[in-house]
């Protein structure tokens, strides 16, 4: 059964993560996302893309077990290809977030143009607690919010709530949980009333100045993750400890 629902309605390509209970981003789900982004990049009716999730939480992030050797060598490039495909999508991308949006899921929505969040939402990069790092967030966060907040998110692993994310400019708007769908549909309606051709041109202009640098930085971060970070004892120990449900024993080196 597919973990991704894909529909087109009212000029919007709608991608819904549906992998209960917390929409873990497995390699299979990432593959489905990339396929849908490619298949619907030139859809005749499309004027925007919406990424949302079924259930109480957007996503708890990637499958930690898939980060262990040797799978990580395929996973990390695949993940970065996925978030890059969202960033490069030729029309406006809106992400609707409720509940937890952690790890790879936070990186995924950072690739969107506009994030609208429920007041139940929280955002975080807990990878440091496992001895690893979030490559896309490490590249994007320092340019998306104040350096101090980016450093706090990346170095502590502690999440922030929707209100703080809105104040930081990471989230465009926060609404009551019961109002999330209507707020998202209102935002989409204000976008999709416009010409698809014009929306594509504006999106291309927005990305023109930053895309090459972003793509190079993501590639460099992915290379460092695979060829440097995962060579450390602590990275493998932290991941194995999480999977084994025990405390990690750091090498202190």
Image: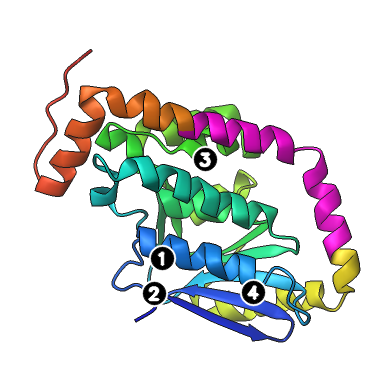
In front here: 88 or 164? 88
Task: State the residue position of label 3.
Answer: 136
Q: Which mark is residue 29?
A: 1
Q: Is residue 93 left or right of residue 65?
A: right
Q: Which disc, if any, is residue 220?
A: none
Q: Position of residue 107 (x, y in %)?
A: 50, 48
Real-space Cα distance between discs 4 and 1? Answer: 23 Å
Q: Nearer the viewer, mark 4 or mark 1?
A: 1
Question: CB atoms at circles 2 and 1 under 8 Å apart?
Answer: yes
Mark 2 or mark 4: which comes first in sequence? 2
Residue 34 sits in quarter:
bottom right
In percent of the image, x 42 and y 46: which residue is there?
Answer: 124
Q: Considering the numbered disc 1 on the image, is that residue within a helix, a strand or a loop?
A: helix
Callout in the foreground (1, 3): 1
Residue depicted at x 23% and y 50%: 65
Per the rendered image, the range of residues in magenta is: 200-222
């Amino acid at each position: 059964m597919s973990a991704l629902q894909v529909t087109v309605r009212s000029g919007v390509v709608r991608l819904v993560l549906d992998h209960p209970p917390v929409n873990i981003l497995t390699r299979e789900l990432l593959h489905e996302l990339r396929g849908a982004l490619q298949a619907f990049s030139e859809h005749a009716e499309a004027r925007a893309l919406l990424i949302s999730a079924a259930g109480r939480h957007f996503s708890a992030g990637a499958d930690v077990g898939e980060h262990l050797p040797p799978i990580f060598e395929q996973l990390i490039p695949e993940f970065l290809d996925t978030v890059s495909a969202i960033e490069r999508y030729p029309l406006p991308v809106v992400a609707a977030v409720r509940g937890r949006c952690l790890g790879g899921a936070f990186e995924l929505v950072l690739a969107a143009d506009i994030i609208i969040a429920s007041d139940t939402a929280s955002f975080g990069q807990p990878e440091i607690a496992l001895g690893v790092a979030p490559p896309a967030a490490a590249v994007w966060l320092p340019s998306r919010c104040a350096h101090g907040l980016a450093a706090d998110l990346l170095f502590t692993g502690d999440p922030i709530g929707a209100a703080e994310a809105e104040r930081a400019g990471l989230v465009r708007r926060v609404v009551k949980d019961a109002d999330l769908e209507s707020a998202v549909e209102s935002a989409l309606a204000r976008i999709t009333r416009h010409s698809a051709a014009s929306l594509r041109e504006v999106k291309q202009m927005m990305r023109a100045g930053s895309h090459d640098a972003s793509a190079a930085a993501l590639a460099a971060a992915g290379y460092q993750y695979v060829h440097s970070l995962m060579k450390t004892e602590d990275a493998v120990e932290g991941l194995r400890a999480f999977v084994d449900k025990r405390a990690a024993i750091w090498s202190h080196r």
